[in-house]
Amino acid sequence: MDVVDRFSGNSVATAYLPPSVLKRPNLTVAVATTVEKVLFDESGSEPRAIGVEVSKSPVSPKYRVKASREVILCGGAVATPHILLVSGIGPQEELSKVGIKVVKDLSQVGKNYYDVGCLPVTGVLCIDPGV
Ligand SMILES: Cc1cc2nc3c(=O)[nH]c(=O)nc-3n(C[C@H](O)[C@H](O)[C@H](O)COP(=O)(O)OP(=O)(O)OC[C@H]3O[C@@H](n4cnc5c(N)ncnc54)[C@H](O)[C@@H]3O)c2cc1C
């Protein structure tokens, strides 16, 4: 995949969601929509994700979207653990302190974020045609 063609940039949307994909009957893309939390069925021995609650803005109505099979959460490095935490998946003590109902006590959610080290490198690359 070209990251940038000659005059315009590509994005995940243009690369993976061309019109041919968007017209698939089993795909609905909701733009400008925020996942507020994951919904769980807690009737079994382990909670099971059954859908998500979404909204257009913090003051807009919230809608529940039901999953027919599974929920795949891919909000990126920061938002994914955030969504899990506000959904009640995380360290019990911390969630209870801020009034979030605990669905599953998982101590490591949100705890393993590391900044990737970055060093500025300046130099001259010499290419020896004899090598
Ligand atoms: C400055 C920078 C430079 C990088 N350069 C490179 C590089 O050169 N090469 C490389 O391989 N990797 C690079 N990366 C890393 C790369 O961007 C990530 O590894 C990759 O984007 C992770 O993909 P992802 O789908 O998990 O998350 P993301 O690409 O972060 O996608 C998450 C998506 O979820 C959306 N989202 C978040 N919260 C919600 C919510 N509540 N509701 C609905 N949607 C939500 C976000 O808007 C976003 O569109 C770079 C990262 C950064 C920050």
Image (cartoon, rainbow, N blue to C red):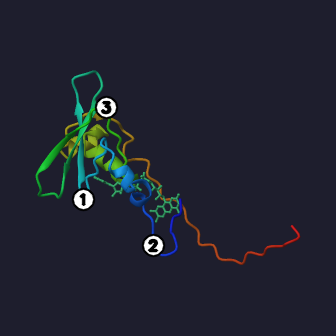
Q: Residues within 10 Å of mark 1 (few under 14, many from 20)?
A: few
> Residue drawn at (26%, 57%), measured in percent from left and top?
31
The earlier-in-sequence mark between 3 and 1 is 1
| Label 3–label 2 contact, CB within 8 A | no
In the image, which is nearer the foreground, mark 1 or mark 2?
2
Q: Mark 1 points at which residue?
A: 32
Q: How crowded is mark 3: few (under 14 residues within 10 Å), some or many (20 or more)?
A: few
Hey, what amino acid is under mark 1?
Ala
The CA distance from mark 3 to mark 1 is 24 Å
On screen, residue 123 above or below 11: below
Mark 3 residue element = loop
Q: Give the camera-side residue of 25 and 15.
A: 25
The earlier-in-sequence mark between 3 and 2 is 2
Q: Mark 2 points at which residue?
A: 8
Q: Mark 3 points at which residue?
A: 69
Q: Give the camera-side residue of 99 and 18.
A: 18
> Residue drawn at (25%, 52%), measured in percent from left and top?
30
The earlier-in-sequence mark between 1 and 2 is 2
Q: Give the camera-side residue of 61 and 92.
A: 61
Q: Which residue lies furthest to the top in this view?
A: 45
- x and y percent of residue 47 in the render? 28, 29
Q: How crowded is mark 2: few (under 14 residues within 10 Å), some or many (20 or more)?
A: few
Q: Using the rendered view, name the quadrant where residue 48 is placed.
A: top left
On screen, residue 120 above or below 109: below
Hey, what amino acid is under mark 2?
Ser
Kindly tell me whether mark 2's CB lies below 8 Å from ligand 1. Answer: no
Please indicate whether residue 60 sits to the left or right of residue 27 in the image. Answer: left
Quadrant containing the C terminus in the rendered view: bottom right
